[in-house]
Amino acid sequence: MTGKQKGKRLLIGAESFADAKPALRIAEALLHHGVSDIGGRFVENLQNTETWPAHAQCVVTSGGALSDAPTAAQQKQQFERDAKAFREDLARIASASKIDWRFDREKGDPVQQLVLAARDWDMLVIGHRRLSHQAGCILSIQTDGSRADRTRTLTDELSRAFRARTMVIPGQQPEAALLTSINRVCARVVVVNAGAETVQETSQVQRLLEAARCPVLILESPERKQRENE
């Protein structure tokens, strides 16, 4: 670890390196905008393998292709490769910017574990591999309140960093309608603050991630916001 704390702390989390890569690019774009240190958290999602039928010979990958179902040993090896690649990329980014960094591993439900871990961080990027070959826009979920300006600022910063257009969706609408709107957009990242109604529960964050099909950047985690209000 290097550097001195003097700004915002950013946590990047993912269950695979394929999911981590686009989130790391988001983090890299934010390092020159008040970020003092970054963390990486790799969550081994055992549920995917534990719930496969014993007779399963093939599985459908996230890309829609058929693949041989990995053995427990193969899955463990993949976890090791993914964690190593994630850690090395995180260290490279931190070293280039001379900021503090840390990396952790755990097992469990990825979104649940990441939301809990983010209570001590200012920002959380949940990784999600992008299946679209299009560049994608910077999608902002706008809400009222003190955090709205911060959301707009980071949206603009990411837009400039990736030379991408921005799109804004009002956050004050029923969750189903909001998720439908998000699902129709090809986004590079979804930016939302912890005050948005759609990220108050872990299950909501999971649904948002599934609708977005790209990394989600949360300014202050739901857990942190809840703790501040207690």
Image (cartoon, helix red, strand yellow):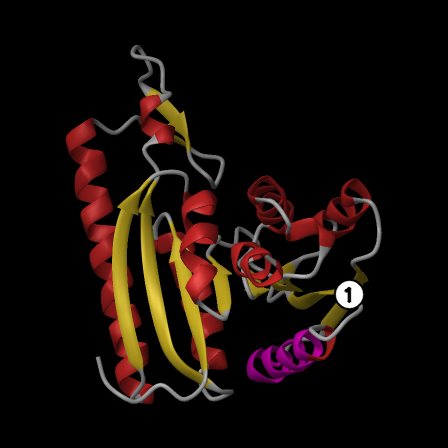
Q: Is residue 67 visible?
A: no
Q: Which residue is mark 1?
A: 143
Quick check: is 62 in the magenta stretch? Answer: no
Q: Is residue 217 left or right of residue 18?
A: right
Q: Is residue 153 above or below residue 135?
A: below
The residue located at (53%, 60%) in the rendering is 224
Q: Which residues are magenta?
A: 150-163
Quadrant of residue 10 within the rendered picture: bottom left
SS at mark 1? loop
Residue 13's x, y, as percent?
40, 57
Quadrant of residue 149 within the rendered picture: bottom right
Q: Is residue 16 left or right of residue 175?
A: left
Residue 203's x, y, as percent?
58, 39
Q: Choose between 80 and 119: the one closer to the eye.
A: 119
The residue located at (77%, 71%) in the rendering is 145
The residue located at (70%, 48%) in the rendering is 183
Main secondary structure of the magenta stretch: helix
Q: Amino acid at mark 1?
A: Thr
Dot 1 crowding, Cα within 10 Å, few <14, some 14–19, many 20+: many
Residue sticking out furthest to the front: 230
